[in-house]
Image: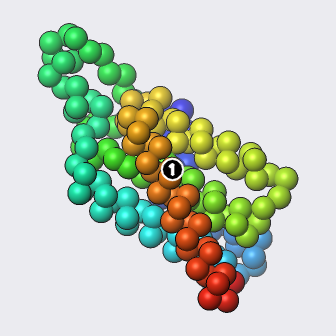
Amino acid sequence: MVIITQFGNGWVLVPLMILILYRVEGSWLSHRFIVIGVSIILGGILGVVIKNVIGRRRPLSAFREDIKDGKVSVHTVLERARKKSFPSGHAQTALGACVAVTWFWAGWYTPGLFIWSFVVAFSRIYLGIHFPLDVAGGALLGIVVSLVVCAAAALCGFV
């Protein structure tokens, strides 16, 4: 799960997608590539805004007093409670990228991409970094933003 969760990190996923999409499209500036990038970036920006507005703490921080008193045990790996929790940026990135990519290139591999994206999102809960609602909110945000951006691009004749 420590490795899987990295596929929801934009610094890992975006370069990987650039290489794959370049291989498929043959150009760095294809319209589809731009639409996918905009959907991921816009989802990320909205996620940060929502995190700052809601201000929900991560599990380790939320249960800090109960942990000290020995009432609760929170299993975490990798990250400490530094940033806000809702929505999960990793879930937003993974599902948003999946939806945007399959909007243009749906095929036999589409179910596998969705399964992989959901596993990445689940890894955030498994590693104790997010609550389930954080992951569901991030996944929903990524899906909706990607659908809106891709549909808008298609309606405007951009792709």
Q: Is residue 31 left or right of residue 3?
A: right
Q: Amino acid at mark 1?
A: Ala
Kindly state the secondary structure of the residue where label 1 is placed.
Answer: helix
Q: For the residue carrying disc 1, how many other residues have a C-alpha within 10 Å: few (<14), some (14-19), or many (20+)?
A: many
Residue that lies at the very extreme toward the top in this rendered image: 70
Q: Of residues 86 and 79, which is closer to you in this image?
A: 86
> Is residue 18 visible from the viewing direction of this image?
yes
Q: How many marks?
A: 1
Q: Is residue 59 above or below residue 52?
A: above
Residue bearing the label numbered 1: 139
> Where is residue 63 drawn, in percent x and y?
22, 25
Q: Is residue 136 above or below residue 95?
A: above
Q: Is residue 29 above or below residue 146?
A: below
> Where is residue 108 drawn, in percent x and y?
85, 53
> Where is residue 45 drawn, in percent x and y?
37, 66
> Is residue 17 visible from the viewing direction of this image?
no
Tell me which residue sits at (24%, 56%) in the image: 52
Tell me which residue sits at (73%, 70%) in the image: 104
Q: Is residue 27 above or below residue 55?
A: below
Q: Quadrant of the C terminus?
A: bottom right
Tell me which residue sits at (65%, 43%) in the image: 116
> Where is residue 111 drawn, in percent x and y?
75, 47
Q: Is residue 89 left or right of residue 150?
A: left
Quadrant of the rendered structure where residue 77 is? top left
Q: Is residue 103 left or right of residue 53?
A: right
Quadrant of the rendered structure where residue 28 is? bottom right
Residue that lies at the very extreme toward the bottom in this rendered image: 157
Tell me which residue sits at (32%, 21%) in the image: 74
Q: Quadrant of the N terminus?
A: top right
Q: Is residue 106 left or right of residue 93?
A: right
